[in-house]
Image (cartoon, rainbow, N blue to C red):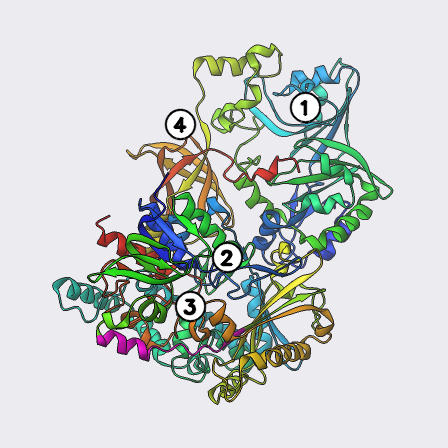
Amino acid sequence: MSDTTNFDAIVIGGGHNGLTTAAYLAKAGLHTLVLERRPLLGGAAITEELYPGFQFTTFSYALSLLRPQIIHELELPKHGFMPLLMPTTFHPLPDRDFIYLGTDRGENLNEIARHSKHDADAYEQYDYDITRVIQAVKPLFDSAPPDVLDGSPEGLVEMAELAKHLRGLEPRVLHNLVRLLTGSAADFLDDYFESVALKGLLASSGIIGTKLGPMSPGSGLVLLFHKMGEHDGTFGQWAFHKGGNGGFSEVLGRAARAYGAEIMTDSEVVRVVTSEGRATGVALTDGTELSAGVVVSAADPRRTFFEFVDPRELPVELVDALRRYKYRGVSSKVNFALDGLPRYPGLEGGDHYRGFLNIGPTMEYLERAFDDAKYGWFSSRPYIDAAIQSTIDPDMAPPGKHVLSCFVQYTPYELEEASWAAERDNLGDTVQDVLETYFPGFSDLVLHREVVTPLDIEQVGGLPEGNIFHGELLAPQLYFFRPAPGWNRYATPISGYYQCGSGTHPGGCVMGGPGRLAAQRILADLGR
Amino acid sequence: MIRRSAFHPRLEQLNATALWTHWAGCLVAPRYQLSEKFEYFALRNAAGLFDTSPLYKYRFTGPEVAEYLGGVLVRNPDRMRAGQAQYTAWCDDRGYVIEDGVLFRHGADDFMLTTAEPNLAYFTALATGTKVQIEDVSDHIAALAIQGPNSRAILAELLPEVSGLGFFHHVDAKLGDAPVTVSRTGFTGDLGYELWIPADDALEVFDAVCESGAPHGLIPVGLDALDMARIEAGLLLLDVDFDSARFAFNDAHRSTPTELGFGWMHRAIESEGRAFIGRDAIRRELEGGLTRWSQVGLIVDWAEHDRAYRSAGLLPPKDHRPVRGESMVYDESGERVGYATSAMYSPVLQRHIALARVRPDLGTVGIGVQVEFTIDHAYEKIAATVTALPFYDPPRRTAMP
């Protein structure tokens, strides 16, 4: 039998990045243990039967930016990986009109032309321009960033390689990249389109999970970030995993175990045990101590640096940078069990529900939703990214019934003179009211409702301030600086202690990128 | 006049694309909505409804029928009891495959064979002087395939008989007033059933299946999605992956059962002693080591495929739509050693896969070869690994509930 208290590597946190790191380490032959605080694996990528027969994706709700290398390198299809296509996008409008996009290019152009003939052509240009930018950024996304503070010859070589890569880009691609990285989503979209409805649909990618409106500089970066997702080679396309994101976490868990990793649930780490500046293991809440030469935190930077270890052991510069690191969650989930499919006046059947329902008709709507949040309140008319996942995977609900996942924004973590405990039902009602205006009779279909506030995301999901990305996707805390200048390459000042969560490059979303790159770093340090 | 299946009045309403193509002289939908990939996922994750009526269906009856079919078909039909079915093939007397099909045994002297192309004259000529009647029942029997993991739950509500039905078994039943035969067969490599229905009852059965299936995610699927599923299932398609020996102009376009991966069909060729058309030639092939090809699957090396496209400044395509037409297969030294016939990016396997025929000494699982892609208007060789067929084989395909 293998040793049950001594490991080569211990990963703190069984979310999708922790599992990814563990699978890679185990595949390389390390005796690896994953410790998960909760009874179920997956962190914020879970599926729970919160109402009999109905499977809820409590937090994250789609396979968004999963790095394709992970699928191949960890042989996920052997373990049940099944990314189901979401073939439609439905964008309802207040006047009962809509934009309904599918997978057929010609039909999509017709649909856009219905709103603006100009925009049908512009849409092709927009799609091409974004795709070229993604192609340019993707190698940087999928490799560890250089350390901008590292003046050693190796560090300078890495910076030179980055400069060389950027120099190699076509001028137009480079300029579009800068437009997106520095500008607002609204400015970028205004440069292409005239239809307010189409701009409303496209702008939503620029705000997801972020305390920015589409008119705020920085939202262009968020838009680009979300377009980095790909499904079978198509950028900007997200998939729904069989059984929800919990189904995906189970696939990762099976892969990790197949490589020999051990996984313990109900095992909360209180601290990383260190000796003379080196990590030697972890201590659990029940007093158990487990030893390992490598300890990896899949938690966010705050817990990684301020809770698991004593910040007084860390350089002051790092502690200062992390104190400035912004979380500021603004997202909630409201999940419904439905007795049947909602009806949209004027559209028969349910084919238009086989993907995301984007409730946020115009950029102005989104910006006004953001305005409420600026002053400490949740949007009176929130943006909703909804998906009736049982139309894609019928096993999510009893036959003929449905589950509806609603990602809701903006709902600031800190409310002005109010608490989320008191406002929970008000938020649920607000979301339900908005849905009722678009889908008359919606409320009659509701069998059950789960409201997941930023406070729940923090307390249950373990994401500080309810930020779904382990910290905002703002330029000062990305790439060279995620989570802090000089510590953007998965190591920490404590030897043998590493970070692999979404607070490291490339960042949040169900993508596994941090987990994969952290494992590469650890294995390189071990000479493997 | 192009034929219309007995289900056409419903299919016409369901086909939102206005696209139609022809299969066996019949109007069929390549897809019913604008995403064949969604239809494919219905087959793999929920259930798909496919009109398989255009298949030719021949009924063989008479006191000598088992003996007759035993002399014509590669597999021994007399090994089946009534209520069983067999995937089989028939050859010319030089041991080359004419076609493949599924044979159903309804009674001691009563069989039905499905075929992709007309075979009535061929079978009738062979029946000269025997007490065998052959009837083309293609137009009388409408056929509806319900395929995918939820297919059993959908049909169990209408036909309790499916609950105990084994793989490649069939049973006669009633659906409402309609007498139907339900078989656990299909062309998707997944759990699935086919209903064989008197044409006059087709619409009644169709409506009942749709109603029962909708809550379980049943949607109609077209030829394109079926083509994806059958490649993953390693099922060959006539005129795509092989040619009929009857109509080929030379032997390069003919294949023996062994060369198509059907060697298992004549495993008992020595012990059984049964004479069937092509047997002697097949024995000579086996004894003399004359087999030219080994039917295999190829799995393309994803990292090399990625690199090849990226270094050309392109995005690596991962297109699920099957590519027909041959691409060449080479060994490590660059010598041409085979050809691929159907290729696609498999969404469930997340790999580029291809059905291929390679030199028999390379037909071993794990052997490395190279397959030709076209990048920037030039041929480029990319590494691939030989694998066994089927590519995708979920346990539910053959498992009992």
> Same subunit under labels 2 and 1?
no
* Label ID, residue B122: 1
Badge 1 or badge 4: first in the primary sequence = 1
Q: Secondary structure at mark 1?
A: helix
* Label ID, residue B359: 4
- Asked if the magenta segment contains residue A329, the reply would be yes
- The three-letter amino acid code for the residue at tag 2 is Pro
> Same subunit under labels 2 and 4?
no
User: Which class describes the residues within 10 Å of circle 2: few (<14), some (14-19), or many (20+)?
Assistant: few
Quadrant for the N terminus of chain A, please: top left
- The three-letter amino acid code for the residue at tag 3 is Tyr
- Asked if the magenta segment contains residue A398, the reply would be no
Q: Secondary structure at mark 3?
A: helix
Mark 2 touches mark 1? (CB < 8 Å): no
User: Which class describes the residues within 10 Å of circle 1: few (<14), some (14-19), or many (20+)?
Assistant: few
Badge 2 or badge 3: first in the primary sequence = 2
